[in-house]
Amino acid sequence: MQLDKVGVRSRLAPFSAQVEAGLQIHLIGANGAGKSTLLARIAGLLPGEGTVLLAGKSLPDYQGHELARYRAYLPQQQPATAVMPLLQYLALHLPGGTCVDRPTVVATIGYLCQKLRLVDKLPHRLNLLSGGEWQRVRLAAIFLQVWPDINSDSKILLLDEPANSLDVGQKAALNDLVRKFCQAGRSVIISTHDLNHSLQQADQIWLLAAGRVVIQGKAKQVMQPKILSKIFGIEFQRQRFHQRDWII
């Protein structure tokens, strides 16, 4: 994916970048910095300035069903208003023309539901799920849309604060799925507030402030106390513990 002076008037200053295959990129910044706006613009769901190229083609040139094969987007909030069973909801996110009974599809649904601890919830209706269960269902569905085993066209996954309502074990499962997706040559862009998670997991960081990407680069270069203190308005330290760096 290539971003050329991509922006949204009065909300996001023009920004250019190239997203290489296999990278995990984290968007960090204070509330209102523009992270969700940038993700929605990259997803093609928010009009604005500049050009977003995906697989060498401008987003407006894709038809909706075609774009859905190349990228998947998880918004920050989405109420569970439907009364359909969980399995039916997942089936709606399969790539167009994919049969739910195919062995590879069955295996992929089983794998994702096992990782996100949803197997026992498959017969349940969406409106009866807890907040954490619904978030895991949303994650399973969005991964299913672009999972490499059943969608060879997939390129990128856009996640806006995907760890909301997840416990520690579920966050670890999400990390594993993101890592495996990237290892298959795909890219993931994640909006997050967990600075230590970004320091330890991200390949690149895009740091936003007041609707502008102020710094982009490798995680260890961007996640410096002086930089973070200026953006968030509090003092930070970076310490090494058990062979890992931590932001304090």
Image (tube, rainbow, N blue to C red):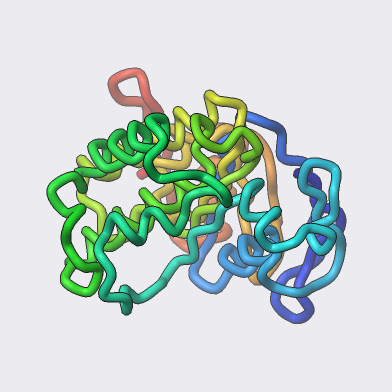
158 and 28: which one is in front?
158
- As drawn, 136 above or below 34: above
Q: Position of residue 154 (x, y in %)?
A: 62, 40
Determine if residue 219 is in view.
no
Which residue is at 40% across, 53% downward?
141
Q: Position of residue 70 (x, y in %)?
A: 66, 46
- As drawn, 93 above or below 245: below
Q: Quadrant of the C terminus?
A: top left
| Count of marks overlaid on the render | 0
Residue farthest toward the left in the current orientation of the protein:
120
Determine if residue 51 is in view.
yes
Which residue is at 26% across, 75% downward?
83
Q: Quadrant of the N terminus?
A: top right
Find residue 210 and report its image quarter: bottom right
Which residue is at 49% across, 65% downward?
75
Which residue is at 65% across, 63% downward?
38
Q: Position of residue 158 (x, y in %)?
A: 56, 52
Find residue 193 and report its image quarter: bottom left
Q: Position of residue 47 (x, y in %)?
A: 76, 74
17 lies left or right of 28: right
229 and 24: which one is in front?
24
Find residue 245 and report its image quarter: top left
83 lies left or right of 236: left
Residue farthest toward the top in the current orientation of the protein:
243
114 lies left or right of 224: left
15 lies left or right of 169: right
